Amino acid sequence: MTQEQFRLTRLQTFNWGTFGGLLDIPISRSGFLFVGPSGSGKSTLLDAHTALLTPPKWIDFNVAAREAERSGKDRNLLSYVRGAWARQTGDAGEHATQFLRHGTTWSAIAETYHDGRDRVVVLAQVLWVRGQGSTHADVKRLYVILQRELSLRELEVFAAHDFDVRRFKQALPDAF
C-alpha cells in the first residue's frame, strides 16, 4: 500500500434500517468480514455503503439475497430511513409494511477514510422524511464531505433545527 492510498477505517450509521441510534464500526486496515445468521443485518450495513457511494439512479439494494425469479425491490431508501422490519399480507391480499420510525425522522451514514500520512476524509449522507411521507420522493438528502473525524452525533443539530441547511452550515462550517 502506498502512503497516498485512502482506506476505509470506520463505518457509522444512525437510524439506518432496523439499527436504531448510532452504530459505529471500526474497520481494521487489514480488512473486515461481516458474518452472521440470516436477518442479522449484514446486507443492511452493505446497503448503507451502497447508499453512500453509489449514484442514486444506480442504487439496487440487497441484490445478493434476491431469488432469480423474484421481481421488484424489497428495500429502498424510504424503507431504511423508516426502519422497515416486516411486511404483512392482509386477508384481501393487500401488503402493509411495518416501520420502527413514524412521523418526521432521519437517518445518516458516514464512512471515514485515512491514508498513510494522517490525512482524513469523511463522506456522509443525511436522509430525512417529514411527517407521514411514504414515497421514495419524500426522502430528502444532504451529502457532506469533511477533512476531519466526524461522529454522526454532530449531525443531530440538523434534525433538532427542522433540517434547516443554513443551521447545518453554521454548526459544521468546515463541511462541504
Image: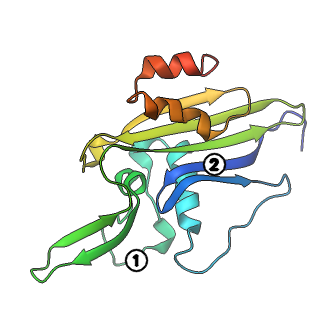
Say which element carries label 2.
strand
Q: Is residue 169 left or right of residue 11?
A: left
Residue 39 to residue 29: above or below: below
Residue 78 to residue 175: above or below: below
Give x and y (percent) for residue 43: 54, 66
Crowding near the residue tagged with mark 2, few <14, some 14–19, many ≥20 C-alpha atoms within 10 Å: many
Residue at 47%, 19% in the rendered image: 167
Residue at 58%, 59% in the rendered image: 45
The answer to whether the residues at label 2 and label 1 have Cβ atoms under 8 Å apart is no
Q: Is residue 21 visible?
A: yes
The residue to which callout 1 is attached is 68
Q: Is residue 176 visible?
A: no
Give x and y (percent) for residue 63: 47, 66
Render colour scheme: rainbow
Give x and y (percent) for residue 28: 82, 55
Say which element carries label 1.
loop
Which quadrant of the figure has residue 82?
Answer: bottom left
Locate the C terminus by quadrant: top right
Locate the N terminus by quadrant: top right
In primary-sequence order, the first of circles 2 and 1 is 2
The residue to which callout 2 is attached is 12
Give the amino acid type for the residue marked by disc 2 in the picture: Gln
As drawn, which residue projects farthest toward the bottom? 91
Residue 72 to residue 38: above or below: above
Crowding near the residue tagged with mark 1, few <14, some 14–19, many ≥20 C-alpha atoms within 10 Å: few
85 vs 143, nearest the viewer: 85
Give the amino acid type for the residue marked by disc 1 in the picture: Ala
Q: Is residue 128 left or right of residue 19?
A: left
Alpha carbon separation for disc pair 2 and 1: 31 Å
